[in-house]
Image (cartoon, rainbow, N blue to C red):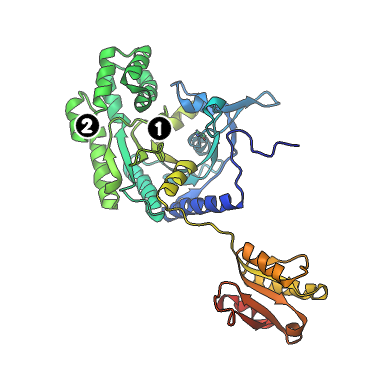
Amino acid sequence: MIPVEPVMGTRDFYPEDMRARNWLFGHFKEVARRFAFQEYDAPVLEHEELYKRKAGGEEITQQMYNFVDKSGYAVTLRPEMTPTLARMILGDPTTKMILPVKWFSLPQCWRFETTQRGRKREHYQWNMDIVGVKSITAEVELLAAITTFFTRVGITAKDVGIKVNSRKVMASILKAQGISEQQFAPVCVVVDKLDKIGPEEVTKELVQLGVSEKTAGTIIETMSARSVEELSTIAEGADQEGLDELKELFVQAEAYGYGDFMQFDASVVRGLAYYTGIVFECFDRSGELRAICGGGRYDRLLSLYGSKQEASEVPCVGFGFGDCVIMELLQMKNLLPDFPQLTDFVVAAFSKDMLPNALTVAAKLREAGATVDMQVELKKKVGQTFDYANRVGAQYVALVAPDEWDKNMVRVKDLRMEDKEANQKDIPLDKLHEWRTF
Ligand SMILES: Nc1ccc(Br)nc1
């Protein structure tokens, strides 16, 4: 017997699961469409070197689902989509990439989670990125897309919040503390774990990175700032431009109508080494779930990849929005609709010699846009046809029988009409295309 369950940490999507996934992705895609983003895609298999980042310590690169293929080439299942976007921008064959570029994708992303954690190894992650815009209106646009999605599915600012911070300000504070540029990304990766491992452990790991205990203390203290104003007072050397951008971001968010979702939080740094400016993450206010989505500005990724071609700094902002936490949240809030199997028609032949006529009826209905479940094998009793029709969620049963056929008619029963007397009528063949008005 072959294993019938999916590989460890992966999920099958049976039809009912697929209906829920298509509903979720339908909202992602509709929001992206309204924001005039273009969809792109790329192979799940990527060059491993895309993720080799000097910062080290990033969970996302430590857990890569990587291997050497039969040609000896180092590849990996992609752990995230942003490096692929950067590769595609740099490798754009048309070189007509007119900036700004606004792209979205719904890639499946992978990690090789050690089995004892028993966590998932794959998820689908809605990505939206704006390439070529320096101003924070790019961040504001992406946050507007996220909050538009929340509003569409019935999630409000009472259910979730968005914590916003600036790594640019953090970088200036660290610089004032004598931390080098090279240390900045690894320090952020460590500091991102503050909630999980606590200040003592963070201090220990920062000291291992060469940060003094005193500076580690200052960093952790700075992260407790509860407002941009407070940050600018307690943090020496805080970058004024970074502080101004944070303030402007909140002003523009109010103008866009989603200010209620937003809050400054100096402890948010996100765990990806390549962020350089604004960073943000959405959380559920009940505190029960992990981050719903997250993102930020990464202005140096393309020049890092394209340094050979001396690619000048190309400003980028993006977010990733996984398919799992959001579904848990929607479940918790009773906001998930039902996803029953539905079809418009079951078409059944009354007898063997009526089967060709039944196929003609099915073709006519499909031509007119109806979904038709053609009963391809005769049932002994017509009751079996109605049982099947109810099971597949059909609205109508079209029974193709000789008496009506001789009058160029088809008997159609509406299964959703209560009144059993009025729920069937004989439809002329040349009126089948008007099925929506039956
Ligand atoms: N990066 C990543 C990939 C796959 C899952 Br599940 N979570 C995070």
* Viewer-closest of 359 and 398: 398
Q: Residues within 10 Å of mark 2 (few under 14, many from 20)?
A: few
Asked whether residue 316 is in view, the answer is: no
- Foreground mark, 2 or 1, reads 2
Q: Quadrant of residue 228?
A: top left
The local crowd at label 1, few if under 14, some if 14 to 19, many if 20 or more residues have their Cα within 10 Å, is some
Residue 234 position, x and y percent, is: 18, 26
Which residue: 80% across, 74% down? 351
The residue at which mark 1 appears reads as 313
Query: If the image is split into quadrants, where does the C terminus sit?
Result: bottom right
Label 2, secondary structure: give it.
helix
**Amino acid type of the residue that numbered disc 2 sits on in the rendered structure:** Gln
Q: Residue 240: which disc? A: 2
Between 305 and 27, which is closer to the camera in this rendering?
27
Above or below, comparing residue 245 to residue 384 in the picture: above
Q: Which mark is residue 399?
A: none
Q: Quadrant of the N terminus?
A: top right
Q: How many marks can you see?
A: 2
Q: Residue furthest left?
A: 233
Query: For the residue marked with disc 1, what is the amino acid?
Result: Glu
Q: Picture quarter containing residue 191? A: top left
**Relative to residue 79, is residue 70 drawn left or right?**
right
Measuring from the top left, give residue 300's x and y in whole percent.
Answer: 41, 30
Front residue of this view, candidates 323 and 289: 289
In this image, 270 relative to 368: left or right? Answer: left
Could one spot residue 380 in this view of the protein?
yes
